[in-house]
């Protein structure tokens, strides 16, 4: 059974989320502080964490950052943010969250987002079975390892999926809406999610990043030798 961690000090919200996820067949642990969330993640039994941005003993953003630096760095994470607080949403994504849901939210929507993130986290990449090379970038789909000039780069599941999608479609321009659909599997959602993930992926790949911004249209991946692709988002 899938094990979900819900970290939120709002008892009512946490209880509603717990009941909806359990109804959908998931095992749920609820904690009310950031320190308890880190402790639970540390035992290695959690398949996905839902973190509230505002909670005592470590807010959701700092907890997410600590998880991404630790041994469970690839754990899928969804951030709960306050409605209308764009800075919180962007900060959550930049800290390494795979997705966010704004409060107040539909518990059903949250459950669907959880299932979507889990599917992406466990999905295989059937198109490529051997190492993919593009310039000084090397990607091993089997181990989800990314290296640049022989140095391994840590990526979240969503960042890895985005990189794989670009590498699989070099030279093709995709709008943010198309990337949200093809990579995230959503036909709705905030396209700033794509913008932030592109920004994070570029930062991690450094000068090896070949994601080109096509103004007024979207993004495309230039293969090595086609010119730099590290334009701003």
Image (cartoon, rainbow, N blue to C red):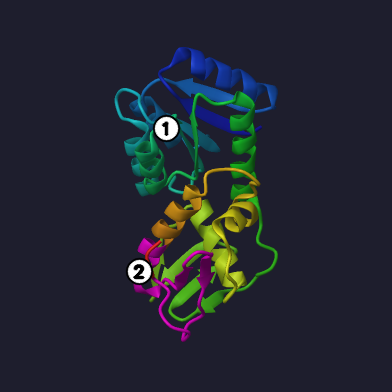
Q: Is residue 99 above or below residue 178?
A: above
* Residue most extreme to the left: 57
Q: In this view, does 97 lie above or below 40?
A: below
Q: Which mark is residue 136?
A: none
Q: In this view, does 202 lie above or below 73?
A: below
Viewer-nearest residue: 106 or 129: 106
Q: How far apart are marks 1 and 2 (CA)?
A: 31 Å
Viewer-nearest residue: 175 or 97: 175
Q: Which residues are the magenta region?
A: 202-230
Residue at (42% x, 45% y) in the render = 93
Badge 2: residue crowd in 10 Å (few <14, some 14–19, many ≥20): few
Q: Where is residue 220 in the image (x, y as percent from the top left)?
A: 53, 70
Task: Answer with left or right where residue 8 lies relative to residue 16.
Answer: left
Instruction: Identify the image quadrant of the N terminus.
Output: top right
Query: Do labels 1 and 2 touch, CB within 8 Å?
Result: no
Task: Answer with left or right where residue 114 lies relative to residue 76.
Answer: right
226 in the magenta segment: yes
Q: What element carries label 2?
A: helix
Task: Report which quarter residue 107 is drawn in.
Answer: top right
Q: What element carries label 1?
A: loop
* Residue most extreme to the bottom: 225
Q: Name the residue under label 2.
A: 206
Instruction: Identify the image quadrant of the C terminus.
Output: bottom left
111 in the magenta segment: no
Task: Answer with left or right where residue 92 lies relative to residue 115.
Answer: left
Q: Where is residue 166 in the image (x, y as percent from the top left)?
A: 56, 68
């Amino acid at each position: 059974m899938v094990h979900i961690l819900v970290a939120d000090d709002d008892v009512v919200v946490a209880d509603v989320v717990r009941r909806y996820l359990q109804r959908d067949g998931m095992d749920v642990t609820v904690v009310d502080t950031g320190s308890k969330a880190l402790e639970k993640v540390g035992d290695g039994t959690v398949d996905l964490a839902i973190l509230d941005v505002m909670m005592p003993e470590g807010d959701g953003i700092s907890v997410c950052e600590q998880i991404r630096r630790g041994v469970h760095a690839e754990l899928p994470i969804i951030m709960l943010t306050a409605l209308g607080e764009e800075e919180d949403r962007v900060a959550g994504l930049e800290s390494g969250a795979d997705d966010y849901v704004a409060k107040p939210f539909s518990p059903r929507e949250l459950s669907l987002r959880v299932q979507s993130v889990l599917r992406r986290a466990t999905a295989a990449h059937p198109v490529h079975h051997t190492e993919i090379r593009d310039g000084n970038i090397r990607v091993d789909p089997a181990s989800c390892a990314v290296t640049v000039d022989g140095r391994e780069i840590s990526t979240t599941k969503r960042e890895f999926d985005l990189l794989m999608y670009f590498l699989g479609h070099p030279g093709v321009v995709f709008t943010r809406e198309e990337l949200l659909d093809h990579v995230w599997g959503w036909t709705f959602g905030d396209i700033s999610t794509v913008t932030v993930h592109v920004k994070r992926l570029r930062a991690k790949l450094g000068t090896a990043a070949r994601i080109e911004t096509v103004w007024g249209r979207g993004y495309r991946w230039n293969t090595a030798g086609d010119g730099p692709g590290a334009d701003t988002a």
